[in-house]
Amino acid sequence: MEGRNEKRRSALFSGKMDMEDMENVLALYRDLFQLNEMDPPLDRPPRELAEKEVRMRLAEGFTLVDPEEILPDGPELAIRIRDVLKILQRHSEDPDSLTGDLKDLIDQPGRLDLLVGTFLREGEESVRKSLASMKDVNPEVAIFVLFNALKVPFLGAARRCRGIDTTAWEKGSCPVCGGEPAVACLIGEGGKRFLICFRCETRWRYRRMACPYCGHEDPKESVFLYSEDADHGALSASVCGQCLSYIKGWRVEGEDPGELCPEIEDLKTPGFDRAVQEEGYLRGAPNVFGLWIGSPDEEAPDRD
Amino acid sequence: MKVTRRDFMKISGAAVSGSALGGLGLGSAAVARSRSGNVAVKYASESTTICPYCAVGCGLIVSTHAGRIVNVEGDPDHPINEGTLCSKAQAVRQVSESSWRLTRPLYRAPGSSEWQEKSWEWVYDEIAKKIKKSRDAGFTKVNDSGQVVNRNDAIASVGSAALDNEECYLLQKWLRSLGLVYIEHQARI
């Protein structure tokens, strides 16, 4: 992960990125990246796992870390949320309109804990429902803030799990935190597929022909979409005919992902997402900001 | 009624649409839209299969677009080759896509330099006639010591690694019924 961070830092701060028309998005990510790097280690680190327990958990399909074990306490979480909000306001065209009732929520640790618990256990759909009664709270802002404020504990947990052999893990979700994979990389001569969780940034091996979101696998036919556009040469989207989800993946020569930073590449290619979604497929996990990209309002077309 | 995520996203409409980043006040929704306008995607599909060449049986992933093979690579999840391929297998696409691929039987008569296109029926009949002729001419019922051998020294067979177990069994039965003793297999050569 350190190597990957180095590459990302170099990509983000070298000024060589071809993202002129999305500079505001990149600048936001740059600040969040720095915040995550600066944040002190957690006061509640995940407990150490014995080798036998690691083996058992992976083989039985239990994640290495229970997200609720690593959650910061209410006041600490409130500080993190304020930090993320400050960054967002710095980049927003209308900073005052962002918070609404969210500001009050942050000052009520009990309610905040409840919301975070809902976010982790039931996902963002439930958060949206919980927020429905709150005045002037944009759900995108709330989800963005929660996702990014919780990132440091998850990164810390993943750091502690670094070096653990996750070969026995057969699920499409993250072996460390249980998050859904956001993107994939096809690495090396054999095109081994690695999935990447944007919550804790863990990378793990997964079957090439299977859908990571529903597990459906059809060796006779696995459909993918690609573009002949030069900007999207190494990019494709594996789509699932069963659950209609898709996952973006980059093909990388050699065994090392090299200069590829999937988080940034994903931000750079929203147009590809939209094109795939216009074919009727849904993105399986949000982007590195914790937000969904595109407009999933069509059913998958009949491709006979 | 169970509401799936797809249904939910449809219901919430604009809230989770392309304006997600715009919802943060970044003013980037228009950017996302303008970029998307230029991206045209194409469908392709991948299927797993086994290399037809040798007896190792390496796993392949074959990518096709509009019914034509566009790529062949090793299957990283196949236990035999784990994604690697020999140089011959890497070129296996040519079996299907080469412009030199034969799609109809060709026959060159003895002494001729010209190939003639023939029907499969004609070819089957000719092969059967030649096998019968060679078998009858070369069949030995009793050897020099007077022992019954019922063998045919005039025909030999070289089996292909592309044959599976069951096909090899049937081939062996058939060859033995003709009295063949020279039965060899590609994998041993």
Image (spheres, grey):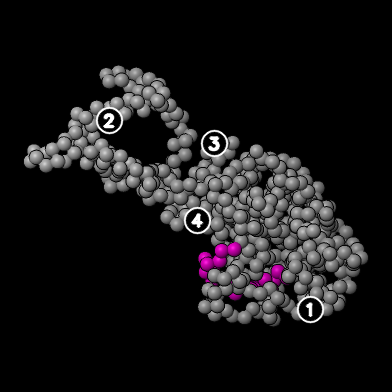
Are the residues under marks 2 and 3 on the same chain? yes
Mark 3 or mark 2, which is nearer the start of the sequence? 3
Rendered residue at 69%/56% (across/down): A284
Q: Amino acid at mark 2?
A: Ile
Q: Amino acid at mark 1?
A: Gly
Magenta stretch: give its range: A150-171
Alpha carbon separation for disc pair 3 and 4: 24 Å
Q: Nearer the viewer, mark 2 or mark 3?
A: 2
Q: Which residue is labeled 1 in the image?
A: A74
Crowdedness near tag 4: few (<14), some (14–19) or many (≥20) residues, C-alpha within 10 Å: many
User: What is the x, y in percent for residue A142?
Assistant: 82, 65
Pointer 2: what residue?
Answer: B131
Residue A226 lies left or right of residue A282; in this view the side is left
Task: Identify the secondary structure beneath mark 2.
Answer: helix
Chain assignment, label 3: B
Q: Is residue A72 magenta?
A: no
Where is B37 relative to B75, above or below? Answer: above
Please tell me which of labels 4 and 2 falls first in the chain.
4
- Amino acid type shown at disc 3: Arg
Marks 2 & 3, CB-CB < 8 Å contact: no
Distance (Cα) linking label 2 and label 3: 37 Å
Residue identified by numbered label 4: B77
Callout 2: chain: B
Q: Is residue B75 above or below residue A81?
A: above
Q: Is residue A292 left or right of residue B174?
A: right
**Snapshot quadrant of residue B150:** top left
Q: Under tag 1, what secondary structure?
A: helix
Say the numbered circle drawn on residue A23.
Answer: none
Name the residue that disc number 3 marks: B68
Disc 2 residue crowd, few under 14, some 14–19, many 20+, Cα 10 Å:
some
Q: Is residue A229 left or right of residue B128?
A: right
